[in-house]
Image (spheres, rainbow, N blue to C red):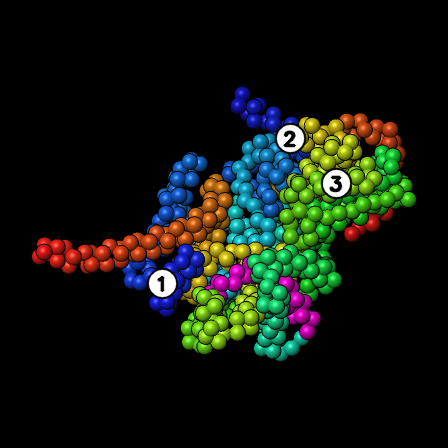
Amino acid sequence: MRRVIVTVPLVLALVGCGGLAPEGEPVPRPRAGTTVGLMYGAGGRGDHAYNDSVAFGLDRAKVEFGLRTKELKAWAGEGDAPRIERLRLLARSGCDPIIGVGFPNAAAVKRVAAEFPRLRFALLDDASATAANITNLVFAVNEGAFLVGAAGAFKSTKDNLGFVGGVNAPQIRQFEVGYRAGIAHVRPKDRIQVEYLSQAPDLSGFSNPALARTAAARMYASGADVVFQAAGSSGAGVFEAALAAGGWAIGVVTDQAKSATPSVRGRIITSMVKEVDVAVFDFIVTVLRGTVKAGPITYDLKAGGVDYTTTGGHIRDFVPRLDALKRQIINGTIKVPTG
Amino acid sequence: MSPQTPDTFVNRLLGRIKLNGLMALAAPVLAILFAGVITSVVLILTDHPPVDTLLAMVEYGSTPRSLVGIINLASAYYLSAMAVALGFRMNLFNIGVDGQYRLAALIAAAVGGAVTLPKPLHIGLILIVAVAVGAAWAGIAGVLKARRGVSEVISTIMLNTIATGLGAWLLAQWAVPVAGSNNIGTNPIPESGHVPSIPLIPGAPNEVFGLFVVAVLVGIGFHVLLNRTRFGFNLRSTGLSEPAAVASGVDVKKMVIVAMLISGGMAGLVGMPQLLGSSYSYSLDFPPGFGFTGIAIALIGRNNPIGVAFGALLWSFLDVSQNILSLEKVSPEIVTIMQGVIVLAVVIAYELVHRYRIAAEQRRVSRELSAPVGMEGAAA
């Protein structure tokens, strides 16, 4: 009887685990005491944005496979030394595999992976640190941003769109580049207003909703009717501005028409989802199966790693055209520029 | 200091009035005990065992590897705090250390990455550039104060913001992308600009940044400059009483500019142990914020080179040992609470001890005065 109860979640896990990892192979039960170590980016669990999406994937694996987890986080601007120490603590305390989230953890993963060659490491959103025991989980965010840019351009009646970036850093400029390309592809003459909330290395723009609200309000006031935000937990401010101005907004990372504050959900026409939770979950699955590979795994449109959402039905009329664009990107007819 | 030092709160706060003997030890011990009590209360309120948690921190913080990390971090904190302390001694509040060291580290890293020179020259050039940039950036605030009477508090805060913007722009101009990463940084400094590290702690797998030595030298230089030179005397007297300094022939305006230049020059060194000892490039990830930590540490250390060294090591110990807390399921923010409480406790403890000393002296004096009066009364 007990065995049955144990196997049910495993079957569910196989059904539930995205389209990325090869299915049909048995997921071995975790060795006694498999502990996943995870180091979040700045903000950590509870940021209602990127890191929470990572946590969602981790929690899913934890529940479905009965794993244990140890979670630490990086602090904005603390430099590499303390991150290396913390990651090493995870390695020494018996965690395997270990996941580092975001480029700030790249140097730490590289160092600690070299010291512990028998442990498996994953690095999310960074392909600079490579080794035989590091898997790099990277996303083609420009492709997803292209689609929401096109969706925004279809939706805009004023031919005027906005982009609010959290921090002016390469990571966020990828979103802007794809978004611009998507708008330009559909409506080449549309006006695009762009604002970044802080300049790297100052990362405060990811956690300043008030500033985001002001920036977005300025865009709506000067004629924009759709604003896309890639600003971490600051994004809530963009939604508030959309509500106040009666404009439209585009969410990021998760389907924010489902996850944002209920009062603003009606203003979110689509979100550019980035399946970080799937990437984390799949990595853990491949580790448990023993099929994990080193090197970059790109989560692009083709792999379903990035996409757009239709919750709320605001872009219902444009879905056929958007899906056509999606197919063209996947088969290479449209090349989306990178930052 | 001198017996003429006016006994004001600010002078007591900034350590211009010294405590003697046991009193000098009582204040910091009181402060740390008080911080321990407050932290324990917070730990109990959040359902964590206070003794076990603090012991886990001490145990982790005293491993050889952690000790090296503590010294490395403390080097930067110390330089930053000494830069602030120099200003404090002259009643100048240099809040701009943060912007000064970030801009200095960026430009020094760019220069260091652009040239190739023999080893000592290369390192020397990078350090000189860093000191010059830090001094120049602080010098703007100095000149504004001397020539236009602009408060250095306002101007240095504004220069911090300008340094952030300027730094972001310069980085965008000079940066080379790191392949496959979302990070960008200046061209890495070649091998000839690296400072070899020192195996200071026996048994540690990692080593102390070579420029730790610079922090020690700056501390010694600070002491000599302030206490053994005429410039130092002028600086201290300007800080204590500007009219008195003017009356005794000190050119206060010149002193303001020179003090800001020296403070900024020291600030320029803050990022150097890290830059030349480990990262070799100024990237998006170069640690900001040391300038503000330096203010708190200067207060803890009461602007005294030895006191600041203890303050820097204590702060750095707390920063490093907090790493263990997340594994113990304790929120690492507890350390931020502890650091804040220590700063407040130091200020309060010194003030209490000062007041106790003043009260005790007054009682002693009044006892001595009243005793003969009583005898005279009895005789009459």
Query: Magenta span: helix, strand or loop, mainly?
Result: helix
Asked whether, in this view, residue A243 is left or right of residue A327, the answer is left
Mark 2 and mark 3, same subunit? yes
Mark 1 and mark 2, same subunit? no
Which disc number belongs to residue B18? Answer: 1
Please tell me whether residue A43 is drawn above or below residue A116 in the rendered image.
above
Q: Residue furthest left?
A: B379
- Categorize mark 1 by other alpha carbons within 10 Å: few (<14), some (14-19), many (20+): some
Chain of the residue on which disc 1 is drawn: B
Asked whether, in this view, residue A73 is left or right of residue A152, the answer is left
Chain of the residue on which disc 3 is drawn: A
Asked whether, in this view, residue B217 is left or right of residue A306, the answer is left
Q: Position of residue B80 (x, y in %)?
A: 52, 62
The amino acid type of the residue labelled 1 equals Lys
Residue stretch in magenta: B88-115
Q: Position of residue B61 (x, y in %)?
A: 43, 53
